[in-house]
Image (cartoon, rainbow, N blue to C red):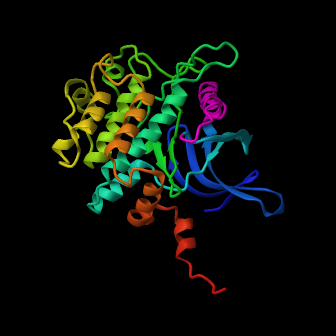
Amino acid sequence: MRETFGQYELLQRFAIGGMAEVFMARRLGAGGFSREVVIKRMLAHLAGDDTYVRMFFDEARLTATLQHPNIAQVLDLGWLDGTWFIAMEFVDGPDLSALMIHLVRNKRPIPIDLAAWIAARAGEGLHFAHEQRDPMTGDSMAIVHRDVSLSNILVSRFGDVKVADFGIARAATRESVITQVGKVKGKPGYLAPEQIRGEPFDRRADVFALGVVLWEMIAGKRLFVGRSDFDTLEMTVDTDAVAPSKLRSEVDPRLDALVLGALQRDPQRRTASAGELAAALDRWLVDGGGADGSRSGLIRWLDEQAPQLWPPSRRKQEAAPQTPA
């Protein structure tokens, strides 16, 4: 499909949810200027609903303040053709969910040191968000992503790792009220126990979710999964995580300790911050990790193991025969 949308050309829709649809797109400009972006377009029938519009605006405003190399950037917010849209940075590669599905199907586990490096970079992005302060008052913005999961961490063929989708993030500066009594926000299997129980929570909820992501990258399977969402939530609250070395013998005790520290059910015993987890993973990589635990390692490994996951347009371009000079 191709659709002109103001200064953008919508190339392919790759997701639709309850509030918006998401497109791979291209921004067009003078002199043949072109830049690939992602467009998140609010569903037209919601464009006049003040509650949804405030949520949409809050997501754009909040993410626009988070200028960090490990956070997917918001580039524009506007109104076109009867609805609101957000233009976001295009990350040329898969999310970790698509990557893990591909690897499991092909029985190719991710290198352990590369899993640790990816988690460390995501941790740095989350820590930056958690540390943000209101520029007017200096008060903490108390940001909690609340939806850290495999599908919201992107990796690019250029070695970038980006935390995405702050759509349900909690922050002191948000105008919209997006949490209803008795309703838990986020994906079952990644929610911290205190979130599930309806207790007060803070940045350590994101640390728990990142610990789940790291465990799943190492193990190549889901950590908390039941026959229903309720079973999954119950399992998360009641079950201690198994040490990753029980599933992959090459995991050493230090890495076991780091993963399990992030997965403590009691937030008081859990790793205190995403920045602390990232720094500890980087120390582990320096002391004992292999060459794959780096940006260059990610570039090389993705190119070898997962070229099928590049966007269709990119695969066609790279498969095209080269014209002799």
Compared to 300, does 204 lie above or below?
A: above
Magenta-colored segment: predominant secondary structure: helix
> Image quarter for residue 269?
top left
Q: Is residue 62 magenta?
A: yes
> Image quarter for residue 273?
top left
Q: Looking at the figure, which quarter contains the C terminus? A: bottom right
User: Residue at (50%, 53%) from the top-left corner?
Assistant: 159
The answer, for residue 224, to whether it is visible in the render is: no
Q: Looking at the figure, which quarter contains the N terminus? A: bottom right
Compared to 46, does 50 lie above or below?
A: above
The answer, for residue 301, to whether it is visible in the render is: yes
User: Residue at (57%, 42%) from the top-left corner?
Assistant: 69
Compared to 315, does 125 lie above or below?
A: above
> In the rendered structure, which segment of residues is drawn in magenta?
46-70
Q: Is residue 299 left or right of residue 107?
A: right
Compared to 47, does 89 lie above or below?
A: below
Q: Is residue 55 left or right of residue 252?
A: right
Q: Nearer the viewer, residue 111 or 226?
A: 111
